[in-house]
Image: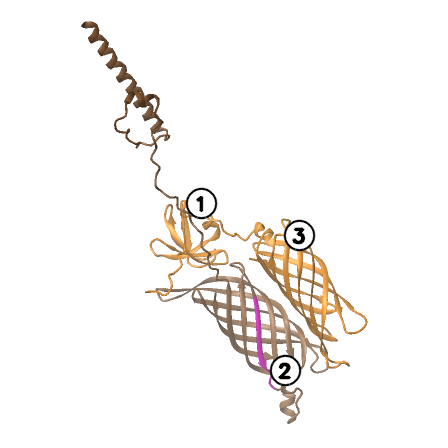
Amino acid sequence: MPARAARAPLQLFVVQPYLELHTGPGRGYPVTQVVGRGESLDVLYRRTDWFKVRTEHGIEGWASVRDLAQTVLADGGPFAVDMGNLAGFRSHRWEAGAFAGAYAGATLVSAYGALSLTDNLKVEADLSQFLGNVSNGYLADIGLAHVFVPEWRISPFVTMGTGITRVQPKATYAQAIDHDDQLAYAGAGLRIYLTRRFFIRGEYRSDVVFTRTNNNEVNPEWRVGFAFFF
Amino acid sequence: MESRIRLLLLSACAVLACAGCAGHRARQARKAGRVPATVTAPQPGSDEDASADNTPPPVVVQPQVQRRTVTVPHIGARNVELGAYYGILSIENFGAQPVQGVKLDYHVTEDFFFQGAYGQARAGETSYELLSGGIQLLSSAERRFTYYDLSLGYNLLPGEIFIGHRVAMTSALYMLGGIGSVDFAGDQNFAVNFGAGFRVLPVDWLAFHVDMQDIVFRTNIFSVYKLTNNLQATVGLSVFF
Protein backbone atom coordinates (compact mmCIF):
# COMPACT_ATOMS: atom_id res chain seq x y z
CA MET A 1 0.00 0.00 0.00
CA PRO A 2 1.60 3.27 -1.06
CA ALA A 3 2.34 5.73 1.69
CA ARG A 4 0.95 8.61 -0.32
CA ALA A 5 -1.46 8.58 -3.22
CA ALA A 6 0.02 10.00 -6.38
CA ARG A 7 -1.49 13.30 -7.49
CA ALA A 8 -3.58 12.85 -10.59
CA PRO A 9 -2.19 14.69 -13.60
CA LEU A 10 -4.23 17.20 -15.52
CA GLN A 11 -6.35 15.56 -18.22
CA LEU A 12 -7.01 17.47 -21.41
CA PHE A 13 -9.13 16.63 -24.45
CA VAL A 14 -8.17 17.35 -28.03
CA VAL A 15 -10.82 19.29 -29.94
CA GLN A 16 -8.73 20.34 -32.91
CA PRO A 17 -8.37 17.84 -35.78
CA TYR A 18 -5.15 16.50 -34.26
CA LEU A 19 -2.37 17.46 -31.84
CA GLU A 20 1.28 16.85 -32.66
CA LEU A 21 3.73 15.25 -30.24
CA HIS A 22 7.44 15.99 -30.66
CA THR A 23 10.32 13.86 -29.41
CA GLY A 24 11.85 16.78 -27.51
CA PRO A 25 10.92 20.14 -26.00
CA GLY A 26 11.60 22.23 -29.11
CA ARG A 27 10.13 23.09 -32.47
CA GLY A 28 12.96 21.31 -34.33
CA TYR A 29 12.39 17.91 -32.79
CA PRO A 30 10.48 15.59 -35.14
CA VAL A 31 6.79 14.78 -34.79
CA THR A 32 6.40 11.06 -34.29
CA GLN A 33 2.87 10.84 -32.85
CA VAL A 34 -0.41 12.66 -33.16
CA VAL A 35 -3.39 12.66 -30.83
CA GLY A 36 -6.75 12.63 -32.63
CA ARG A 37 -9.83 14.71 -31.96
CA GLY A 38 -11.76 13.52 -28.93
CA GLU A 39 -8.83 11.68 -27.38
CA SER A 40 -7.42 12.68 -24.03
CA LEU A 41 -3.90 13.20 -22.75
CA ASP A 42 -2.34 13.62 -19.32
CA VAL A 43 -0.02 16.58 -18.70
CA LEU A 44 3.03 15.44 -16.75
CA TYR A 45 5.21 18.55 -16.43
CA ARG A 46 6.42 21.63 -18.24
CA ARG A 47 9.76 22.79 -19.61
CA THR A 48 9.82 26.33 -20.96
CA ASP A 49 6.93 26.47 -23.43
CA TRP A 50 6.63 22.72 -23.91
CA PHE A 51 4.65 20.13 -21.95
CA LYS A 52 5.50 16.49 -21.46
CA VAL A 53 2.25 14.58 -22.02
CA ARG A 54 1.07 10.98 -22.05
CA THR A 55 -1.68 9.77 -24.38
CA GLU A 56 -4.48 7.29 -23.63
CA HIS A 57 -2.28 4.62 -25.21
CA GLY A 58 0.62 5.33 -22.86
CA ILE A 59 2.76 7.13 -25.44
CA GLU A 60 4.74 10.07 -24.12
CA GLY A 61 5.86 13.12 -26.07
CA TRP A 62 6.17 16.88 -25.99
CA ALA A 63 3.37 19.24 -26.96
CA SER A 64 3.78 22.96 -27.48
CA VAL A 65 1.94 25.47 -25.33
CA ARG A 66 0.23 26.88 -28.43
CA ASP A 67 -1.25 23.49 -29.27
CA LEU A 68 -2.26 22.71 -25.71
CA ALA A 69 -3.99 26.08 -25.40
CA GLN A 70 -6.53 24.81 -27.95
CA THR A 71 -7.48 21.74 -25.91
CA VAL A 72 -10.26 21.66 -23.32
CA LEU A 73 -10.67 20.41 -19.79
CA ALA A 74 -12.90 17.47 -18.87
CA ASP A 75 -15.79 19.85 -18.16
CA GLY A 76 -15.49 21.37 -21.61
CA GLY A 77 -13.91 24.57 -20.37
CA PRO A 78 -10.83 26.05 -22.03
CA PHE A 79 -7.33 25.24 -20.77
CA ALA A 80 -5.99 28.60 -19.62
CA VAL A 81 -2.21 28.61 -19.70
CA ASP A 82 0.54 31.19 -19.39
CA MET A 83 1.76 31.78 -22.94
CA GLY A 84 4.74 34.00 -22.11
CA ASN A 85 3.78 36.94 -24.32
CA LEU A 86 3.09 40.66 -24.04
CA ALA A 87 0.15 39.93 -21.71
CA GLY A 88 2.59 38.14 -19.44
CA PHE A 89 4.94 41.13 -19.56
CA ARG A 90 2.11 43.25 -18.20
CA SER A 91 1.00 40.82 -15.54
CA HIS A 92 3.27 38.23 -13.97
CA ARG A 93 4.34 36.96 -10.59
CA TRP A 94 8.14 36.87 -10.70
CA GLU A 95 10.93 38.41 -12.69
CA ALA A 96 14.72 38.25 -12.59
CA GLY A 97 17.65 39.59 -14.54
CA ALA A 98 21.33 40.44 -14.75
CA PHE A 99 22.96 43.80 -15.43
CA ALA A 100 26.20 45.50 -16.28
CA GLY A 101 26.75 49.11 -15.35
CA ALA A 102 28.73 51.61 -13.37
CA TYR A 103 28.75 52.65 -9.73
CA ALA A 104 30.68 55.75 -8.73
CA GLY A 105 33.09 55.18 -11.60
CA ALA A 106 33.56 51.48 -10.93
CA THR A 107 32.31 48.65 -13.13
CA LEU A 108 29.13 47.10 -11.78
CA VAL A 109 27.87 43.52 -12.08
CA SER A 110 24.39 43.02 -10.73
CA ALA A 111 21.53 40.54 -10.46
CA TYR A 112 18.03 41.14 -9.23
CA GLY A 113 14.74 39.40 -8.53
CA ALA A 114 11.29 40.92 -8.10
CA LEU A 115 7.90 39.83 -6.83
CA SER A 116 4.84 41.56 -8.28
CA LEU A 117 2.38 42.73 -5.66
CA THR A 118 0.22 44.19 -8.43
CA ASP A 119 0.84 44.82 -12.11
CA ASN A 120 2.21 48.22 -11.12
CA LEU A 121 3.98 47.59 -7.84
CA LYS A 122 6.91 45.25 -7.29
CA VAL A 123 9.18 44.33 -4.41
CA GLU A 124 12.75 44.03 -5.63
CA ALA A 125 15.99 42.68 -4.20
CA ASP A 126 19.40 43.32 -5.77
CA LEU A 127 22.87 41.95 -5.23
CA SER A 128 25.73 43.79 -6.94
CA GLN A 129 29.49 43.89 -7.00
CA PHE A 130 31.45 46.92 -8.07
CA LEU A 131 35.04 46.65 -9.26
CA GLY A 132 37.09 49.81 -9.44
CA ASN A 133 40.66 50.98 -9.55
CA VAL A 134 40.59 52.30 -6.00
CA SER A 135 38.20 49.96 -4.28
CA ASN A 136 35.91 47.01 -4.78
CA GLY A 137 32.77 46.21 -2.91
CA TYR A 138 29.27 44.86 -2.74
CA LEU A 139 25.79 46.31 -2.66
CA ALA A 140 22.74 44.50 -1.32
CA ASP A 141 19.45 46.33 -1.32
CA ILE A 142 15.71 45.89 -1.28
CA GLY A 143 13.06 48.30 -2.43
CA LEU A 144 9.87 49.02 -4.28
CA ALA A 145 9.37 49.75 -7.96
CA HIS A 146 6.31 51.36 -9.46
CA VAL A 147 5.60 50.73 -13.15
CA PHE A 148 3.39 53.52 -14.45
CA VAL A 149 1.74 51.80 -17.42
CA PRO A 150 2.63 48.11 -17.36
CA GLU A 151 0.83 47.32 -20.63
CA TRP A 152 3.14 49.56 -22.65
CA ARG A 153 5.97 47.81 -24.52
CA ILE A 154 8.29 50.60 -23.38
CA SER A 155 7.28 51.15 -19.82
CA PRO A 156 8.82 53.69 -17.43
CA PHE A 157 9.15 53.06 -13.73
CA VAL A 158 10.50 54.63 -10.56
CA THR A 159 12.16 52.85 -7.70
CA MET A 160 13.38 53.51 -4.18
CA GLY A 161 14.73 51.45 -1.34
CA THR A 162 17.49 50.82 1.13
CA GLY A 163 20.41 48.48 1.60
CA ILE A 164 23.96 48.03 2.73
CA THR A 165 27.31 48.38 1.04
CA ARG A 166 30.66 46.84 1.84
CA VAL A 167 33.63 48.77 0.51
CA GLN A 168 36.99 47.01 0.18
CA PRO A 169 39.74 49.54 -0.61
CA LYS A 170 42.59 48.11 -2.64
CA ALA A 171 45.65 47.17 -0.61
CA THR A 172 47.90 49.50 -2.56
CA TYR A 173 46.06 52.48 -1.16
CA ALA A 174 46.19 53.93 2.31
CA GLN A 175 43.50 53.17 4.90
CA ALA A 176 42.80 49.80 3.35
CA ILE A 177 40.13 48.84 5.86
CA ASP A 178 36.90 47.22 4.79
CA HIS A 179 33.82 48.99 6.07
CA ASP A 180 30.07 48.48 5.88
CA ASP A 181 27.59 51.32 5.51
CA GLN A 182 23.88 51.68 5.07
CA LEU A 183 22.51 53.32 1.95
CA ALA A 184 19.27 54.53 0.46
CA TYR A 185 18.49 54.98 -3.19
CA ALA A 186 15.97 56.48 -5.56
CA GLY A 187 15.91 56.07 -9.30
CA ALA A 188 14.00 55.73 -12.52
CA GLY A 189 14.26 53.64 -15.66
CA LEU A 190 12.65 51.90 -18.57
CA ARG A 191 11.42 48.36 -19.17
CA ILE A 192 11.41 47.45 -22.86
CA TYR A 193 9.62 44.29 -23.93
CA LEU A 194 11.62 42.25 -26.46
CA THR A 195 9.93 38.95 -27.21
CA ARG A 196 8.55 35.89 -25.46
CA ARG A 197 9.53 36.28 -21.78
CA PHE A 198 12.41 38.72 -22.26
CA PHE A 199 12.73 42.40 -21.70
CA ILE A 200 15.52 44.93 -21.38
CA ARG A 201 15.71 46.94 -18.23
CA GLY A 202 17.80 50.06 -17.87
CA GLU A 203 17.84 52.45 -14.94
CA TYR A 204 19.65 55.22 -13.16
CA ARG A 205 19.86 55.48 -9.39
CA SER A 206 21.23 57.95 -6.96
CA ASP A 207 22.67 56.14 -3.96
CA VAL A 208 23.16 57.98 -0.67
CA VAL A 209 25.66 56.15 1.53
CA PHE A 210 25.40 57.01 5.21
CA THR A 211 29.07 57.00 6.13
CA ARG A 212 30.60 57.30 9.57
CA THR A 213 32.08 60.65 8.70
CA ASN A 214 30.25 63.96 8.79
CA ASN A 215 29.46 63.88 5.10
CA ASN A 216 27.33 61.33 3.35
CA GLU A 217 28.39 60.07 -0.04
CA VAL A 218 26.13 60.41 -3.04
CA ASN A 219 27.08 57.89 -5.70
CA PRO A 220 25.51 57.66 -9.14
CA GLU A 221 24.61 54.19 -10.35
CA TRP A 222 23.37 53.18 -13.76
CA ARG A 223 22.87 49.74 -15.17
CA VAL A 224 21.29 47.99 -18.11
CA GLY A 225 20.67 44.31 -18.74
CA PHE A 226 18.41 41.46 -19.71
CA ALA A 227 15.54 40.30 -17.59
CA PHE A 228 12.78 37.74 -17.89
CA PHE A 229 9.44 37.10 -16.21
CA PHE A 230 7.80 33.87 -15.13
CA MET B 1 -83.43 6.82 -29.10
CA GLU B 2 -81.68 7.75 -32.26
CA SER B 3 -80.96 11.25 -30.90
CA ARG B 4 -79.43 9.76 -27.74
CA ILE B 5 -77.13 7.55 -29.80
CA ARG B 6 -76.16 10.55 -31.94
CA LEU B 7 -75.42 12.62 -28.81
CA LEU B 8 -73.29 9.82 -27.40
CA LEU B 9 -71.26 9.49 -30.60
CA LEU B 10 -70.73 13.27 -30.84
CA SER B 11 -69.50 13.37 -27.20
CA ALA B 12 -67.08 10.52 -27.87
CA CYS B 13 -65.69 12.38 -30.96
CA ALA B 14 -65.24 15.56 -28.92
CA VAL B 15 -63.35 13.71 -26.18
CA LEU B 16 -61.08 11.98 -28.74
CA ALA B 17 -60.41 15.25 -30.52
CA CYS B 18 -59.35 16.96 -27.26
CA ALA B 19 -57.11 14.07 -26.35
CA GLY B 20 -55.50 14.14 -29.79
CA CYS B 21 -54.76 17.85 -29.57
CA ALA B 22 -53.20 17.44 -26.12
CA GLY B 23 -51.00 14.62 -27.33
CA HIS B 24 -49.88 16.67 -30.33
CA ARG B 25 -48.93 19.63 -28.11
CA ALA B 26 -47.02 17.33 -25.79
CA ARG B 27 -45.08 15.85 -28.69
CA GLN B 28 -44.26 19.31 -30.00
CA ALA B 29 -43.07 20.45 -26.58
CA ARG B 30 -40.98 17.32 -26.22
CA LYS B 31 -39.34 17.95 -29.59
CA ALA B 32 -38.51 21.48 -28.52
CA GLY B 33 -36.91 20.12 -25.34
CA ARG B 34 -39.16 22.05 -23.05
CA VAL B 35 -40.84 19.09 -21.44
CA PRO B 36 -39.13 15.79 -20.61
CA ALA B 37 -40.57 12.55 -21.87
CA THR B 38 -41.19 11.27 -18.37
CA VAL B 39 -43.80 12.90 -16.23
CA THR B 40 -45.36 11.78 -13.02
CA ALA B 41 -48.45 9.62 -13.14
CA PRO B 42 -51.71 11.26 -12.10
CA GLN B 43 -52.65 10.93 -8.49
CA PRO B 44 -54.80 7.88 -7.80
CA GLY B 45 -58.45 8.61 -7.41
CA SER B 46 -58.30 11.99 -9.03
CA ASP B 47 -61.07 13.15 -11.31
CA GLU B 48 -60.01 13.78 -14.91
CA ASP B 49 -62.38 16.72 -15.30
CA ALA B 50 -61.16 18.28 -12.09
CA SER B 51 -57.49 17.81 -12.98
CA ALA B 52 -58.04 19.54 -16.29
CA ASP B 53 -59.24 22.68 -14.53
CA ASN B 54 -57.80 22.98 -11.01
CA THR B 55 -54.70 20.82 -10.44
CA PRO B 56 -51.23 22.32 -10.98
CA PRO B 57 -49.22 21.26 -14.06
CA PRO B 58 -47.49 17.89 -13.81
CA VAL B 59 -44.27 17.84 -11.77
CA VAL B 60 -41.14 17.39 -13.87
CA VAL B 61 -38.67 14.83 -12.61
CA GLN B 62 -35.40 16.60 -11.85
CA PRO B 63 -32.35 14.76 -13.29
CA GLN B 64 -30.05 13.53 -10.52
CA VAL B 65 -26.85 14.39 -12.46
CA GLN B 66 -24.22 16.65 -10.91
CA ARG B 67 -22.10 18.61 -13.39
CA ARG B 68 -18.41 17.69 -13.12
CA THR B 69 -16.19 20.51 -12.01
CA VAL B 70 -12.51 20.28 -12.94
CA THR B 71 -9.89 21.72 -10.66
CA VAL B 72 -6.77 22.37 -12.70
CA PRO B 73 -3.84 20.97 -10.71
CA HIS B 74 -0.52 22.75 -10.58
CA ILE B 75 1.67 21.64 -13.47
CA GLY B 76 5.24 21.25 -12.28
CA ALA B 77 7.82 23.22 -14.23
CA ARG B 78 11.29 21.79 -14.69
CA ASN B 79 13.16 24.82 -15.94
CA VAL B 80 15.92 24.94 -13.35
CA GLU B 81 19.14 23.03 -13.85
CA LEU B 82 21.63 22.62 -11.03
CA GLY B 83 24.99 21.05 -11.72
CA ALA B 84 28.67 20.70 -10.95
CA TYR B 85 31.66 20.60 -13.24
CA TYR B 86 35.32 19.66 -13.19
CA GLY B 87 38.10 20.26 -15.67
CA ILE B 88 41.19 22.21 -16.56
CA LEU B 89 41.69 25.97 -16.32
CA SER B 90 44.67 27.49 -18.05
CA ILE B 91 45.55 30.57 -15.99
CA GLU B 92 47.64 32.84 -18.17
CA ASN B 93 51.30 32.75 -17.04
CA PHE B 94 50.43 30.38 -14.16
CA GLY B 95 49.91 27.10 -15.98
CA ALA B 96 46.94 24.81 -16.41
CA GLN B 97 45.36 23.63 -13.20
CA PRO B 98 42.31 21.61 -12.16
CA VAL B 99 39.14 23.64 -11.73
CA GLN B 100 35.81 22.75 -10.18
CA GLY B 101 32.59 24.64 -9.78
CA VAL B 102 28.86 24.71 -9.57
CA LYS B 103 26.32 26.32 -11.83
CA LEU B 104 22.65 27.12 -11.84
CA ASP B 105 20.68 27.50 -15.07
CA TYR B 106 17.20 28.80 -15.66
CA HIS B 107 15.75 27.87 -19.04
CA VAL B 108 13.52 30.74 -20.06
CA THR B 109 12.54 29.53 -23.53
CA GLU B 110 13.52 26.58 -25.66
CA ASP B 111 16.25 28.81 -27.15
CA PHE B 112 17.60 30.93 -24.29
CA PHE B 113 18.75 30.28 -20.75
CA PHE B 114 20.41 32.24 -17.98
CA GLN B 115 23.35 30.76 -16.12
CA GLY B 116 25.16 31.64 -12.96
CA ALA B 117 28.43 29.82 -12.25
CA TYR B 118 31.00 29.82 -9.49
CA GLY B 119 34.35 28.09 -9.88
CA GLN B 120 37.69 27.87 -8.19
CA ALA B 121 41.17 26.69 -9.02
CA ARG B 122 44.67 27.07 -7.67
CA ALA B 123 47.29 28.74 -9.81
CA GLY B 124 50.64 27.08 -10.44
CA GLU B 125 53.98 28.80 -10.84
CA THR B 126 55.15 31.06 -13.61
CA SER B 127 58.14 30.17 -15.76
CA TYR B 128 60.13 32.84 -13.93
CA GLU B 129 59.35 31.25 -10.56
CA LEU B 130 60.34 27.83 -11.82
CA LEU B 131 63.62 29.02 -13.29
CA SER B 132 64.65 31.48 -10.59
CA GLY B 133 65.06 28.85 -7.96
CA GLY B 134 62.65 29.69 -5.17
CA ILE B 135 61.38 33.19 -5.83
CA GLN B 136 57.61 33.35 -5.28
CA LEU B 137 55.58 36.11 -6.91
CA LEU B 138 52.40 35.20 -5.07
CA SER B 139 51.68 33.87 -1.63
CA SER B 140 49.76 30.66 -1.17
CA ALA B 141 46.52 32.54 -0.46
CA GLU B 142 47.00 34.74 -3.50
CA ARG B 143 47.24 31.71 -5.78
CA ARG B 144 43.63 30.91 -5.11
CA PHE B 145 41.69 31.69 -8.29
CA THR B 146 37.92 32.06 -7.83
CA TYR B 147 35.39 33.48 -10.21
CA TYR B 148 31.69 33.84 -10.84
CA ASP B 149 29.79 34.78 -13.94
CA LEU B 150 26.26 35.61 -15.03
CA SER B 151 25.69 34.47 -18.60
CA LEU B 152 23.04 34.30 -21.26
CA GLY B 153 23.04 31.10 -23.29
CA TYR B 154 21.56 30.25 -26.65
CA ASN B 155 20.80 26.73 -27.81
CA LEU B 156 22.30 27.03 -31.27
CA LEU B 157 21.92 23.47 -32.51
CA PRO B 158 19.28 21.42 -30.67
CA GLY B 159 19.12 17.84 -31.80
CA GLU B 160 19.17 14.20 -30.86
CA ILE B 161 21.80 11.53 -30.39
CA PHE B 162 20.98 7.98 -31.37
CA ILE B 163 22.63 4.96 -29.80
CA GLY B 164 21.66 1.76 -31.58
CA HIS B 165 18.09 1.22 -32.72
CA ARG B 166 16.21 2.02 -29.55
CA VAL B 167 17.95 4.81 -27.64
CA ALA B 168 17.53 8.46 -28.57
CA MET B 169 18.73 11.29 -26.34
CA THR B 170 17.98 14.96 -26.80
CA SER B 171 21.00 17.23 -27.02
CA ALA B 172 22.00 20.80 -27.79
CA LEU B 173 25.09 22.67 -28.82
CA TYR B 174 24.90 26.02 -27.11
CA MET B 175 26.81 29.27 -26.93
CA LEU B 176 26.94 31.53 -23.94
CA GLY B 177 28.52 34.76 -22.87
CA GLY B 178 28.36 36.93 -19.82
CA ILE B 179 30.04 39.06 -17.22
CA GLY B 180 31.40 38.40 -13.79
CA SER B 181 34.35 38.78 -11.51
CA VAL B 182 37.69 37.04 -10.91
CA ASP B 183 39.41 37.04 -7.54
CA PHE B 184 43.07 36.28 -8.08
CA ALA B 185 46.45 37.45 -6.82
CA GLY B 186 44.88 39.46 -4.03
CA ASP B 187 42.69 41.50 -6.33
CA GLN B 188 39.21 41.31 -7.77
CA ASN B 189 38.68 42.21 -11.40
CA PHE B 190 35.77 42.58 -13.75
CA ALA B 191 35.68 39.67 -16.21
CA VAL B 192 33.95 38.78 -19.43
CA ASN B 193 33.34 35.16 -20.31
CA PHE B 194 32.23 33.50 -23.53
CA GLY B 195 32.26 29.97 -24.83
CA ALA B 196 30.30 27.03 -26.10
CA GLY B 197 29.08 23.74 -24.74
CA PHE B 198 27.33 20.54 -25.54
CA ARG B 199 24.49 19.12 -23.46
CA VAL B 200 23.12 15.56 -23.66
CA LEU B 201 20.07 14.39 -21.71
CA PRO B 202 19.90 10.60 -21.25
CA VAL B 203 16.63 11.19 -19.40
CA ASP B 204 14.53 14.30 -19.04
CA TRP B 205 15.93 15.22 -15.63
CA LEU B 206 19.64 14.51 -16.12
CA ALA B 207 22.21 16.18 -18.38
CA PHE B 208 25.88 15.69 -19.20
CA HIS B 209 27.85 18.72 -20.26
CA VAL B 210 31.10 19.40 -22.07
CA ASP B 211 32.05 23.09 -21.99
CA MET B 212 34.79 25.31 -23.36
CA GLN B 213 35.04 28.83 -22.05
CA ASP B 214 37.36 31.80 -22.08
CA ILE B 215 37.48 34.05 -19.03
CA VAL B 216 38.98 37.40 -19.93
CA PHE B 217 40.02 39.98 -17.38
CA ARG B 218 42.48 42.80 -16.97
CA THR B 219 45.10 42.53 -14.27
CA ASN B 220 48.31 44.20 -13.13
CA ILE B 221 49.98 41.27 -11.41
CA PHE B 222 53.27 42.16 -13.09
CA SER B 223 52.83 45.90 -12.37
CA VAL B 224 51.54 46.49 -15.87
CA TYR B 225 47.86 46.31 -16.76
CA LYS B 226 47.35 43.48 -19.16
CA LEU B 227 44.37 41.63 -20.63
CA THR B 228 44.57 37.94 -19.84
CA ASN B 229 42.76 35.02 -21.49
CA ASN B 230 42.08 32.05 -19.29
CA LEU B 231 40.75 29.05 -21.18
CA GLN B 232 38.71 26.46 -19.39
CA ALA B 233 37.58 23.00 -20.51
CA THR B 234 35.20 21.11 -18.24
CA VAL B 235 32.81 18.21 -18.07
CA GLY B 236 29.77 18.36 -15.85
CA LEU B 237 26.63 16.72 -14.62
CA SER B 238 23.38 18.49 -13.83
CA VAL B 239 19.82 17.72 -12.87
CA PHE B 240 16.61 19.45 -13.87
CA PHE B 241 13.96 20.25 -11.31
For marks 2 and 1, give the CA distance: 66 Å
The image position of residue B19, as x and y in percent, is 28, 20
Asked whether A98 falls inside the magenta stretch, the response is: no
For marks 1 and 3, give the CA distance: 34 Å
Q: How is the image coloured?
A: by chain
Point out the tag, 1 or 3, that comes first from the N-terminus.
Answer: 1
Do marks 2 and 1 share a chain? Answer: no
Q: Which mark is residue B211?
A: none
Task: Please tell me in which quadrant of the rendered image residue B18 appears.
Answer: top left
What chain is tagged by disc 2? B
For the residues labelled 1 and 3, say whether their Cβ atoms are less than 8 Å apart: no
Label 3 Cα neighbours within 10 Å, binned few <14 / some 14-19 / many ≥20: some
* Residue bounds of the magenta highlight: B115-124
Q: Is A191 situated above or below B89?
A: above
Specify the amino acid type for callout 1. Answer: Gly
The image position of residue B68, as x and y in percent, is 39, 46
Label 1 Cα neighbours within 10 Å, binned few <14 / some 14-19 / many ≥20: few
Disc 2 target residue: B93
The image position of residue B148, as x and y in percent, is 60, 73
- Disc 1 vs disc 3: which is toward the camera? 1
| Residue visible at 34% across and 21% down in the picture | B53
Disc 1 target residue: A77
Specify the amino acid type for callout 2. Answer: Asn
Q: Residue furthest front?
A: B45
